[in-house]
Amino acid sequence: MSRTWIVVAESSRAKIYEAANAGADLVEREDLVHPEGRLHERDLVSDRPGHDSGTAGSGPHVLDESTSAHVEEMQKFAREIAARLEQGLNDKAYDRLVLVAPPKFLGVLRDVLAQGVAATVAETLHKNLVQHGAEEVREHVQALL
């Protein structure tokens, strides 16, 4: 019998559901929340970017971060989800994964998954279903189970 975890996520929230088999109801195992993922860039940074007077001939310029604070928070939350999935795999809590997330977050999440966890990803779905209940999520992933 194959136990499947369905991870429904976006930048500020993730739900982990379990399906004991293809015909079983989804059971919510966890609800992870990352409130910083909902904040605007201006709320995540404390002040304006630094300035540099420049070298001879180059003039002054702004020292800007190469990665926005919002992207950093998204990556931080993706790493948190990935760590939880790795723990579940080590505990033998699931055999396969179905990942459901908007395309941008799905890419970030896939990039941080440990090799063993990535090997269990059976299917992906590019949708934001994190605000939907288990029954509606099941309707979208039924064919993937």
Image (cartoon, helix red, strand yellow):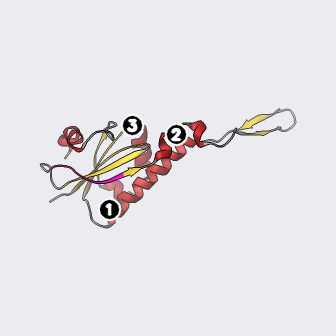
Nearer the viewer's eye, disc 2 or disc 1? Answer: 2
Nearest to N terminus: mark 3 or mark 1: 1
Residue 74 shows up from this direction:
no
Q: Position of residue 116 (x, y in %)?
A: 35, 60
**Residue 103, labelled with which disc?**
3
Amino acid type indicated by mark 3? Pro
Question: Magenta span covers which residues?
Answer: 25-31
Name the spot of residue 128 as percent of width and height, x first: 34, 37
Query: Could you say which is closer to the camera, residue 115 or residue 80?
Result: 80
Label 1, residues with CA under 10 Å away: few <14, some 14-19, many ≥20: some
Mark 2: amino acid: Leu
In the drawing, what numbered circle is on residue 88?
1
**Left or right of 128 on screen, residue 145:** left
Which of 49/35 is in front? 35
Q: Which residue occupies the extreme right position in the image?
A: 56
Please check the rendered image and state whether residue 100 is part of the magenta-colored stretch, yes or no: no
Distance from disc 3 to disc 2, alpha carbons, whole Å, reads 20 Å
Q: Residue at x 65, y 42 (%)?
A: 65
| Nearer to us in this view, 122 or 84 | 84
* Separation of marks 2 and 1 at Cα, in angstroms: 29 Å
Marks 2 and 1, the one that precedes in the sequence: 2
Tell us which disc is closer to us: 3 or 1.
1
Q: Position of residue 34 (x, y in %)?
A: 45, 48
| Kind of residue indicated by mark 1 | Gly
Magenta stretch holds residue 29: yes
Secondary structure, mark 2, is loop
Q: Are marks 3 and 1 in contact (CB under 8 Å)?
A: no
Left or right: 73 with respect to 63? left
Q: Which residue is mark 2?
A: 39
